[in-house]
Amino acid sequence: MNVNNIILAVCVVGGIGLIFGLLLAYASHIFKVEVDERVEKIQGILPGANCGSCGYAGCAAFAEAVVNGTAPVNGCTVGKAPVAEKVAGIMGVDAGEVKEVVARVMCTGDAASVVYKFEYSGIDDCKAAAKFGGGSKGCQSGCVGLGRCAKVCPFGAIEVKNGVAVVDDEKCQACGKCIKECPKALIKLVPKKQRHWVVCSNPETGKFVNQYCKNGCIGCRMCEKECHFDAIHVENNHAIIDYDKCKNCGLCAKKCPRGVIVSIPRPGAKPKVVVKDTPEENQ
């Protein structure tokens, strides 16, 4: 091959590349999708946790939804009020009331309170252990205690203490990842201002609960009868608080014979569960 042929080949290849480049540039211009600059601004002030607690796949998707009008400006539970105000400023609307929530583990059946059916020695994971008869604890609805929720928490807000998961209020950002991973669906988002909640989700009657858990709700309805605001009722054999009605008076917690209703007497205090020695049974 002589020099002229080489030059010709280079020119042909270069020409083809130039033509395709021009075509691609033209196509990108024709099919360009205009992005609202507000999306980028909103995404820039979001925490970047991409946790999905807002109901969208990530921060970028949430930002687009806000601009499109399908998501509220105060929908970021991790960013809370400060982020909501900034997002509202970009959108030119009022941020509205931001109700802060925190994750709560609706179980307090630790190693000292429950009866174990067997010793589990398999994969160190709650979902794996739950496949073996619901886990090693006698309570089929109780915390498995292997810390899957703690492992997925991006904020280090959950710790397994004595066989049961415990949430640190100050670290929790209500991202909801722990909720999705709990095989027993024991973790719920509760208003942060709520000073009382029920730490049991067992659907069985008191007769059976007493056989394997000292801290389980026995469905006696004493809390229900004591409440002056119709805020707590026994459903499916365990007490459930309606947080919209609850006034945080604490009468239900004082009346509960099992200490199943956790009470935080002042902001920043740690929850304490008191177990009574002679509980009333619900047959």
Image: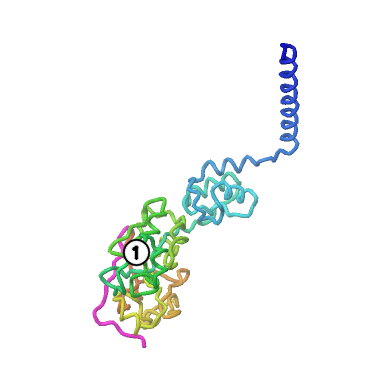
Q: Nearer the viewer, residue 169 or 96?
A: 169
Residue 175 on image: x %, y %: 46, 55
Q: Residue at x 29, y 61 (%)?
A: 161
Q: Nearer the viewer, residue 111 or 269?
A: 111
Q: Residue at x 30, y 64 (%)?
A: 163
The residue positioned farthest toward the top in the image shown: 3
- Label 1 amino acid? Gly
Residue 121 on image: x %, y %: 32, 64
Q: Is residue 22 magenta?
A: no
- Segment tinted magenta in the rendering: 268-283
Which quarter of the rendering shows the N terminus?
Answer: top right
The residue positioned farthest toward the bottom in the image shown: 283
Q: Is residue 281 magenta?
A: yes
- How would you rate the neighbour count of disc 1 (Cα within 10 Å): few for under 14, some for 14-19, many for 20 or more? many
Q: Quadrant of residue 233?
A: bottom left
Which quarter of the rendering shows the C terminus?
Answer: bottom left
Q: Is residue 266 left or right of residue 10?
A: left
Q: Is residue 201 above or below residue 51?
A: below
Q: Which residue is mark 1?
A: 145
Q: Quadrant of residue 75?
A: bottom right
